[in-house]
Amino acid sequence: MKPSTPKGTEAIPFTPLIIIGAGRSGTNALRDALTRLPSFATWPCDEINPIWRHGNLDWPNDEIPPERATPAVRKSIRSSFQRIWRQQGRPNFVVEKTCANALRVPFVDAVFPEARYIHIVRNGFDIVASARKRWRGELEVPGLPYYLAKARYAPLSDLPRYAISALRNRLAIKFGRQEHFDSWGPRFEELDSLASAPLEEIVARQWAACVTSSDMAFEQINTSRVFVLRYEDFTQNPFDVLTKITYWLGITASETQLEEATSPIRASSVGKGQDVAETLPDNIKSLLIPPLRAHGYLDQE
């Protein structure tokens, strides 16, 4: 049964394909592979969190509840998707991968009850090893062009707030006033209370919050609308995984198209958190165990 459009909301002539995953889980690689195929398109920037948060900037974190998806908020977000759909040649699917959505799937679903979801999960130990570099600013993307691309799609009235926050964060790192950003990636509810916690604990809690929140949300959504995969499976066999995704979506893609779409994908980053797994304190490891077990990682031991 096809989900109904929210009452009083205009139907859209495409399907929103929402990739859900914690930061450093391969959401970029998956989005890029999909949008190399015909029938898929996305924004020419990394993420669109300002679009998702417009009308809810006063909410203290990214765990925005579904009741905050008011008619005005739904209209704003849906209109943004429709604009990019027109600009990108009216594809069958508009793909989006803002990582903060991992903390607010019910909100996203209130905006887009017709959406399809791909939930991508990566080994939490690899996440800690990778994401802590982002928190320290060690893997920063090129500055101005990156932010200008994101700013192009942010609501104008919200831009000053984002600009001030980003500038403050980066200046503090640049001049050595702090060892890592105040915030990077999805802002979970506990984050502000962890200012003095070790960075590894912050990153572990962030990943666990994203995976657990998404898992709980998808239990309430029809399984026909959700495709779950592990980053490791995707990078080891990208052609096979993308073939399964297109079949699930009812899209026909040639072998050549699938090969070209997946050719840049490598598995070289898999297992880089092994040292982390061996050296993390037990109290931090324990944060990772439940989501790892839920997604079959501990079964490999």
Image (spheres, grey):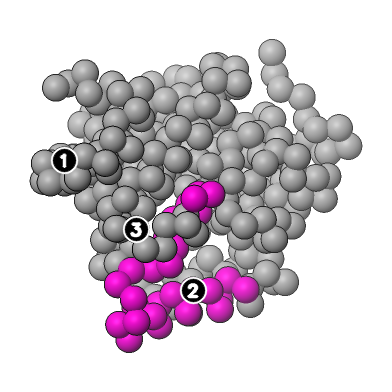
Specify start and end residues of the magenta stretch as a single range.
161-190
**Which residue lies at the image location 33% right of the left edge and 38% below the top edge?**
287
Disc nearest the viewer among 1 and 3? 3
**Which residue lies at the image location 67% right of the left edge and 29% below the top edge?**
114
Residue 229 marker: none
- Residue 210, by quadrant, is top left
Residue 277 marker: 1
Q: Is mark 3 on a helix, strand or loop?
A: loop
Residue 51's place in the image compared with 156, above or below, is above
| Front in this rendered view, residue 112 or 216 | 216
**Residue at the limit of the structure toward the top, as seen here:** 1
Q: Is mark 2 on a helix, strand or loop?
A: helix
Residue 259's place in the image compared with 201, above or below, is above
Residue carrying label 2? 166
First reached walking from the N terminus: tag 1 or tag 3 = 3
Q: How far apart are marks 1 and 3 (CA)?
A: 19 Å
Disc nearest the viewer among 3 and 2? 3
Inspect this view and state whether residue 109 appears: yes
Q: What element carries label 1?
A: helix
